[in-house]
């Protein structure tokens, strides 16, 4: 079916199959449609259907809260066409040339599921075709029998990647995380769409790196550190990582973080912030390259970074309150340029 998008910057067209979401079809064909989570939670990918018809996949998606559905507003990540459509998108759009990081549909096979702590697991996805992505990006995963997709950042990084490493925190009532935690899912096939996301690391920018993560939000930070370490980025640039967890026992990926510190020429520092437990020593008892601190991760970051915000690019990921507070500190108090404060809004 033919989809015409009327944007502030002109009209664009792309083809969309009846079973495909409008957002995914447009992105896969190089149209830079607005989005953040791509799963129905944020509301960024809104459009108004002015001609034609669509069917909405998830009527209760939180992103519908501010939309005027009676006037034809839809979330493009949840809408599938049932005819040719004309959609008004109130944004400046552009069409990209063919790029190796253009998102596409793939399948993946779940492998090597392992528990990292009481409520966090990671696993590998063996892809049906290699994926090239930027460090810090994510994919949307769909499992049979579970309504809707879930967005997860890649933990790993390598060119033309054949396997993705993903980490998932169990959430009360979370259908996908309950599926992972409650079943033997090794060998299960899932649908994969990506890469997605704009909170990406580009070494050519030549800026010092600040990462602030809570819980499973550390995933994308590991991908960024992997690329930085591969390119020996911290030989000439500084890096600060603040990783927030509740208690010392809740920490994970600590060996990986310590390995990055060891390869960082003394210019990369990692601090584990304990929000519900007082740190008993200044460094981790098993990984002395990792510093310990007590308090919310945003508080720990603000205290450690005071007066040290020059020439930074910052990456944020984690629970919404944490990200919101980090944004306030970096944009309003530290006066960081918005261009260099990056996050993807999953919730």
Image (cartoon, grey):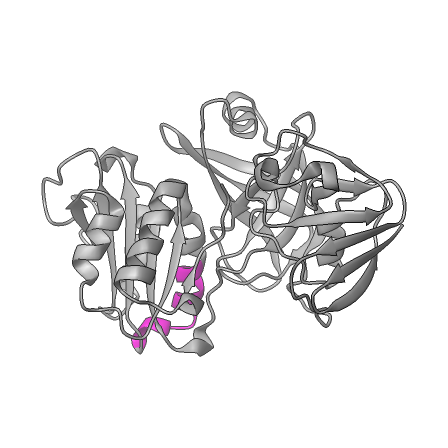
Magenta stretch secondary structure, dominant: helix
Relative to the observer, which residue lies in front, 323 or 6?
A: 6
Work out whether 83 lies above or below 246.
Answer: below
Q: Is residue 40 magenta?
A: no
Above or below, 167 against 240 in this view is above
Residue range of the region highlighted in magenta in the rendering: 224-235
Question: Which residue is the extreme one toward the front?
Answer: 71
User: Depth check: 332 or 198 in front?
Assistant: 332
Give the number of marks: 0
Is residue 296 shown left or right of residue 200? left
307 to the left or right of 339: left
x and y, in percent, of residue 160 in the image: 62, 62
Q: Which residue is drawn at 13% across and 40% down?
A: 279
The residue drawn where x is 30% and y is 47% is: 254
Residue 204 drawn at (x, y percent): 46, 78
For residue 55, above or below residue 292: above
> Can the viewer see residue 271?
yes
Q: Which residue is drawn at 26% across and 69% down?
A: 309
Residue 120 image point, x, y percent: 41, 33
Taking depth in this image into account, of 230 and 85 the one nearest to the observer is 85
Observer able to see residue 284:
no
Left or right: 89 with respect to 140? right
Q: Where is residue 339 in the image (x, y as percent from the top left)?
A: 44, 68
């Amino acid at each position: 079916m033919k989809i015409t998008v009327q944007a502030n910057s002109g009209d664009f067209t792309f083809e969309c199959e009846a079973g495909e979401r409008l957002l995914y079809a447009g992105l896969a064909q190089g149209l830079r449609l607005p989005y953040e989570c791509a799963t129905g939670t944020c509301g960024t990918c809104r459009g108004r259907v002015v001609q034609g018809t669509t069917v909405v996949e998830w009527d209760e998606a939180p992103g519908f809260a501010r939309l005027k559905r009676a006037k034809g507003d839809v979330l493009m990540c949840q809408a599938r066409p049932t005819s040719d459509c004309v959609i008004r998108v109130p944004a400046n759009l552009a069409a990209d040339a063919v790029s190796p990081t253009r998102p596409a549909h793939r399948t993946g096979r779940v492998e090597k599921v392992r528990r990292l702590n009481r409520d966090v697991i990671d696993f590998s996805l063996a892809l049906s075709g290699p994926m090239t992505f930027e460090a810090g990006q994510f994919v949307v995963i769909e499992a049979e029998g579970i309504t809707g997709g879930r967005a997860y950042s890649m933990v790993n990084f390598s060119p033309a990647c054949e396997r993705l490493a993903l980490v998932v925190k169990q959430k009360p009532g979370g259908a996908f995380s309950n599926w992972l935690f409650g079943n033997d899912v090794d060998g299960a096939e899932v649908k994969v769409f990506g890469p997605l996301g704009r909170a990406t690391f580009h070494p050519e920018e030549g800026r010092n790196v600040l990462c602030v993560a809570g819980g499973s939000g550390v995933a994308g930070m590991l991908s960024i550190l992997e690329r930085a370490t591969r390119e020996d980025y911290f030989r000439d640039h500084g890096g600060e990582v603040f990783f927030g967890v509740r208690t010392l026992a809740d920490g994970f990926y600590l060996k990986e973080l310590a390995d990055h510190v060891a390869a960082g020429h003394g210019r990369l520092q990692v601090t584990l912030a304990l929000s519900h437990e007082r740190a008993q020593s200044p460094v981790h008892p098993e990984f002395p390259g990792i510093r310990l601190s007590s308090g919310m991760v945003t508080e720990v970051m603000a205290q450690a970074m005071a007066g040290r915000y020059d020439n930074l690019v910052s990456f944020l990921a984690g629970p919404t309150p944490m990200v919101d507070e980090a944004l306030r500190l970096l944009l309003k108090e530290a006066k960081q340029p918005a261009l260099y404060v990056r996050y993807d809004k999953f919730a």
